[in-house]
């Protein structure tokens, strides 16, 4: 695909599988130079220094240029000052380097940074050479060749979770996780000169050693390419956890189209996130716990969670936090409850979460309780809340190990097993080793692991939440079609409207009313928000009334059939220049002015997904018959089709759409703001 805003650029394989590396500007100084060389040589890669005077630095041989190396390197790491960077990049490319890592060119370069970066990017792109950076940490590959300018933490464990970050400090935090998460790689992208997050994600979709992906996202340079990369990961069956910052928008602006106010960049992003089944973490702790939960061979099949705790208080806390995360605990069936009650004893209450702690025979009760839960078929996830600490006594260590051993004996095919320590400290070493051996995630904290498991479960069971939230919109737009033209265009797409006529004189208005049949509605054609400016009159029942009201309106005016009263809802959308066609739904009429309870989705919806979107409007599914909901969903689909055919930037409001109590839906107001032709 030739469009640079959509094209996904390759050439990244050598960054994860490098065998030979050139360190341009190699130095024995402490800091980034020493760390880079130590990281590059830690796992057997061949590293060469490039230095005009030295023959050897920190044990690696040096050459005067990349062209003078024994062979073209898989990557070149440029550790030179900003004024020498372009020359170093040109030498590396001329010497056949297959990729460049540029950690520098940050604040130290001042105003010179941008033109230098562009020049290097142009040079590298013309030669088909991918650049990571500038102003990045590099690429860390635990167990492999790490072109990384920071210290890689002790115990960093190779694994199948790939991470991509736009923040060097977040990259360092991941590099310091030790063995918490088995990492395929950490990509620190920096300024994303000629390879960005979309390109890296697309490569990871094809990477056989990657099974799940974590993203720390500050900005999206090419949203359509980003969307396609996410869809490629989804198609590859690789879940994605995203921690996105910069989610808030400041200030509410007045807009002509309600859609311009409610379809903000954040809502557009979340529409794409839901389409690609992205798991959005709220903070770094939840981000890490979600990645740790995927660090197993078999993800959960669904979102039904049974929890076994070590106290009544812990059980109550879990239940509260699960409810806060929109994942209330599913009760045990009568049969399972009776079986667990028999195990616990006559005084115990068998409910989910289950307090299985006992003064005597604690391990026996846990072991006996796990079996019927796992075999019941009622739950996808069995979470054992067992607080961990390396400072506990011998009795607590033994009990903890035996309980977790019983959990491990269930096997991964029966139920997804997870251990959760609310204390969020280092685990008992024997328990950590056992959990790693049996691929059981050992999560830490209270809310973070519960939130992560809730979202992972919703993804697995295809029950993603459609979150609504208040935020601002883009600046006002001034040009819009008159309602008559807008309604005609939308009606050709199959969207139902009441009968209407455009009248230029009082006589034409009366003739139109007689043709349509009373009662009728009279409203100005060119005014965007008629109710706010008294440019609409409902319930006109006589020719004299139509004539009198017409004189007081901005003309020409519409004479419209008055539809039966019903619930008012909203559907709108925009052919967004970044994310493509997006549709939004919510409660309509003046309720929409509050800009809450609006949810959005990419426009290509089938009936099932459109109904899911409509059902997400709080209170709507229980307030109107299924036939009306299905008619509303059909309007959503048809509006999406209209937007897909429209020019970029086109915005549409259908507000309100009236849901007819007897079944059906009719759009009684339409606003179309054309985009660029």
Image (tube, helix red, strand yellow):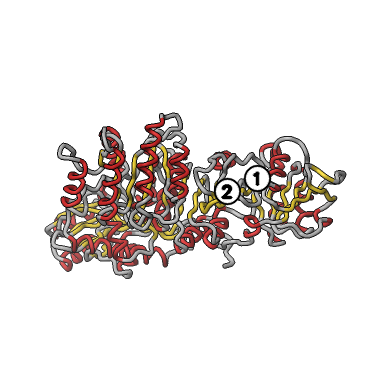
Residue 101 appears anywhere in the view: yes
The location of residue 553, given as percent across then percent down, is: 26, 52
Name the residue nearer the viewer: 161 or 332.
332
Q: Residue 148 has which mark?
A: 1
Residue 588, how many percent across, how many down?
Answer: 26, 51
Q: Position of residue 488 (x, y in %)?
A: 31, 67
Residue 601 lies in quadrant = bottom left
Residue 204 appears left or right of 540: right
Question: In which quadrant of the rendered view does residue 171 lie?
Answer: top right
Query: In this orientation, does residue 526 appear?
Result: no
Secondary element at tag 1: strand
At 72% from the left and 39% from the top, the residue drawn is 34
Q: Is residue 663 left or right of residue 676?
A: left
Along the line of sight, which residue is nearer the eye, 589 or 25? 25
> Residue visible at 44% across and 36% down?
428
Q: Please, is residue 175 above or below residue 70 in the view?
A: above
Q: Give the camera-side residue of 258 and 640.
A: 640
The alpha-carbon separation of the residues under discs 2 and 1 comes to 9 Å
Q: Nearer the viewer, residue 455 or 343?
A: 343
Q: How many marks?
A: 2
Q: Residue under circle 2?
A: 186
Q: Residue at x 51, y 59 (%)?
A: 229
């Amino acid at each position: 695909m030739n469009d640079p805003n959509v094209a996904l650029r390759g050439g990244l394989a050598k960054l994860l599988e490098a065998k030979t590396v050139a360190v341009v500007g190699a130095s024995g100084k402490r800091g980034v130079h020493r760390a880079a060389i130590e990281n590059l040589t830690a796992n057997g890669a061949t590293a060469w220094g490039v230095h005009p005077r030295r023959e050897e630095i920190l044990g690696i041989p040096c050459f005067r240029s990349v062209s003078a190396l024994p062979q073209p390197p898989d990557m070149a790491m440029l550790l030179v000052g900003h004024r020498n960077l372009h020359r170093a990049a040109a030498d590396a490319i001329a010497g056949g380097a297959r990729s460049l890592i540029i950690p520098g060119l940050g604040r130290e370069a001042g105003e010179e940074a941008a033109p230098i970066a562009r020049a290097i990017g142009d040079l590298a792109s013309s030669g088909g050479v991918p650049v990571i950076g500038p102003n990045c940490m590099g690429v860390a590959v635990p167990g492999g060749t790490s072109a990384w300018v920071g210290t890689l933490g002790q115990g960093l464990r190779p694994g199948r979770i790939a991470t991509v970050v736009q923040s060097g400090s977040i990259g360092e935090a991941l590099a310091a996780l030790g063995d918490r998460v088995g990492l395929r790689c950490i990509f620190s992208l920096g300024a994303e000169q000629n390879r960005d997050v979309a390109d890296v994600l697309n490569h990871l979709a094809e990477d056989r050693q990657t099974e799940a992906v974590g993203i720390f996202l500050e900005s999206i340079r090419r949203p359509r390419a980003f969307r396609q990369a996410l869809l490629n990961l989804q198609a590859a069956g690789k879940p994605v956890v995203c921690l996105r910052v910069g989610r808030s928008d400041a200030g509410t602006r007045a807009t002509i189209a309600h859609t311009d106010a409610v379809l903000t960049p954040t809502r557009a992003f979340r529409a794409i996130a839901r389409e690609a089944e992205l798991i959005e973490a709220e903070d770094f702790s939840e981000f890490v716990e979600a990645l740790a939960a995927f660090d197993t061979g078999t993800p959960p099949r669904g979102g039904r969670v049974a929890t076994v705790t070590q106290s009544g208080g812990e059980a109550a806390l879990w239940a509260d936090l699960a409810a806060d995360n929109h994942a209330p605990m599913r009760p045990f069936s009568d049969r399972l409850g009776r079986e667990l009650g028999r195990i616990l004893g006559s005084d115990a209450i068998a409910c989910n979460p289950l307090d299985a702690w006992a003064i005597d025979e604690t391990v026996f009760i846990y072991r006996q309780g796990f079996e019927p839960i796992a075999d019941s078929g009622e739950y996808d996830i069995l979470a054992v809340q067992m607080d961990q600490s390396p400072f506990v006594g011998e009795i607590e260590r033994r009990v903890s190990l035996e309980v977790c051993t019983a959990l491990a004996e269930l096997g991964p095919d029966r139920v997804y097993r997870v251990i959760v320590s609310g204390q969020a400290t280092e685990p008992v070493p024997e328990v950590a080793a056992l959990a790693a051996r049996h691929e059981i995630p050992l999560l830490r904290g209270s809310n973070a692991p519960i939130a992560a498991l809730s979202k992972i479960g919703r993804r697995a069971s295809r029950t993603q939440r459609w979150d609504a939230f208040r935020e601002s919109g883009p600046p006002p737009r001034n040009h819009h079609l008159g309602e008559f033209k807008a309604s005609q265009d939308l009606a050709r797409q199959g969207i139902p409207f009441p009968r209407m006529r455009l009248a230029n004189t009082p006589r034409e208005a009366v003739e139109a009313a007689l043709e349509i049949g009373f009662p009728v509605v009279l409203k100005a054609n060119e005014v965007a928000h008629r109710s706010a400016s008294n440019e609409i009159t409902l319930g006109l029942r006589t020719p004299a009334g139509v004539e009198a009201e017409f004189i007081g309106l901005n003309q020409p005016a519409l004479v419209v059939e008055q539809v039966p009263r019903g619930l008012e809802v909203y559907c709108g959308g925009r052919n967004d220049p970044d994310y493509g066609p997006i549709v939004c739904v919510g409660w309509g009429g003046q309720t929409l002015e509050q800009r809450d309870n609006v949810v959005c989705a990419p426009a290509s919806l089938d009936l099932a997904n459109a109904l899911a979107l409509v059902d997400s409007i709080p209170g709507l599914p229980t307030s109107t018959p299924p036939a009306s909901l299905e008619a509303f969903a059909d309007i959503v689909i048809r509006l999406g089709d209209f937007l897909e055919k429209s020019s970029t930037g086109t915005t549409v409001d259908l507000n309100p759409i009236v849901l007819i109590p007897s079944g059906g839906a009719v759009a009684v107001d339409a606003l179309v703001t054309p985009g660029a032709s």
